[in-house]
Amino acid sequence: MARAKGARAQMALAFETVYGTPPAGGYTKMPFASTTLGAEQPLLNSELLGYGRDPLAPIKDAVTADGDVVVPIDAEAFGFWLKAAFGDPVTTGTGPWTHEFRSGAWTLPSLTIETGMPEVPRYAIYSGCVLDQLSWQMQRSGLLTATARLVAQGETVGTVSSAGTPAPIDLRRFGHFNGSITRNGAALGNVVSAQITYANNLDRIETIRADGRI
């Protein structure tokens, strides 16, 4: 069996038109540091008596698909995660543009995310992803990353990519050294570190359906 290499790992993302339906195209190659996206389907032990000491075949339980994606905070790719957290921004200007993301949207966009390991090969596509929480830490030095916590509807694993050739991102990454904290336009002094967390507090609608998904 081939061994996957992190240098060749890839992630592609596209916004869905219909929840849970992966789009045919329009994927973007996303920078990421790590991911724990995955699906789990527990097995339930039989409670029946009178069949001897050997266990009976287990019964499949519902599917749970979720996980975290650690991403860099940069000038372009991070906008995808902000849109997933807040919805479409209010955009003004003619280039450079100003994007204002506002909290409290009634509906949030859903994503399809594909993680690929070409050496294996293994391509896992997660449809119906909705961003539950976005958090990052501010400090004086170090690498600036954010953690996006996602709730997905399900996982489909294949040996061929379904994302085609994703559009590349021009990575222009921000660092802690460039950051500042202001209040009403004035610098706020003596802040050593800060932890910022935005949560949508999603609830899974655990509908009864044949495939066990939400």
Image (cartoon, helix red, strand yellow):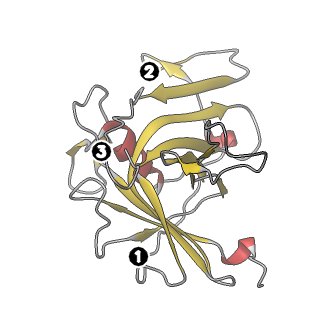
Picture residue at 42% right of the left edge, 16% below the top = 184
- Closer to the camera: disc 1 or disc 2? 1
Viewer-proximal residue, 207 or 117?
207
Whole-Å distance between the Cαs marked 3 and 1?
A: 23 Å
Residues under numbered marks 1 and 2 in contact, where contact means CB atoms less than 8 Å apart: no
The x, y position of residue 205, in whole percent, is 33, 35
* Label 2 CA crowd tier, 10 Å (few <14, some 14–19, many 20+): few
Q: How much space separates mark 1 and mark 2, taking CA atoms?
A: 36 Å
In which image quadrant can residue 2 be found?
Answer: bottom right
Query: What residue is shown with label 2?
Result: 185
Tell me the residue that label 1 is attached to. Answer: 167
Q: Amino acid at mark 2?
A: Gly
Which mark is first along the chain, 1 or 3? Answer: 3
- Residue 27 relative to residue 49: left or right: left
Q: Indicate the secondary structure of the residue bearing disc 1.
A: loop
**Are the two marked residues, 3 and 1, in contact with CB atoms closer than 8 angstroms?**
no
Type of amino acid under label 1: Ala
The residue sitting at 28% across, 40% down in the picture is: 108
Q: Which residue is mark 3?
A: 98
In the rendered image, residue 24, in percent from the top left (x then y), is placed at 28, 75
Q: Residue at x 49, y 48 (%)?
A: 63
User: Does the image show residue 73?
Assistant: no
Q: Is residue 149 above or below residue 184?
A: below
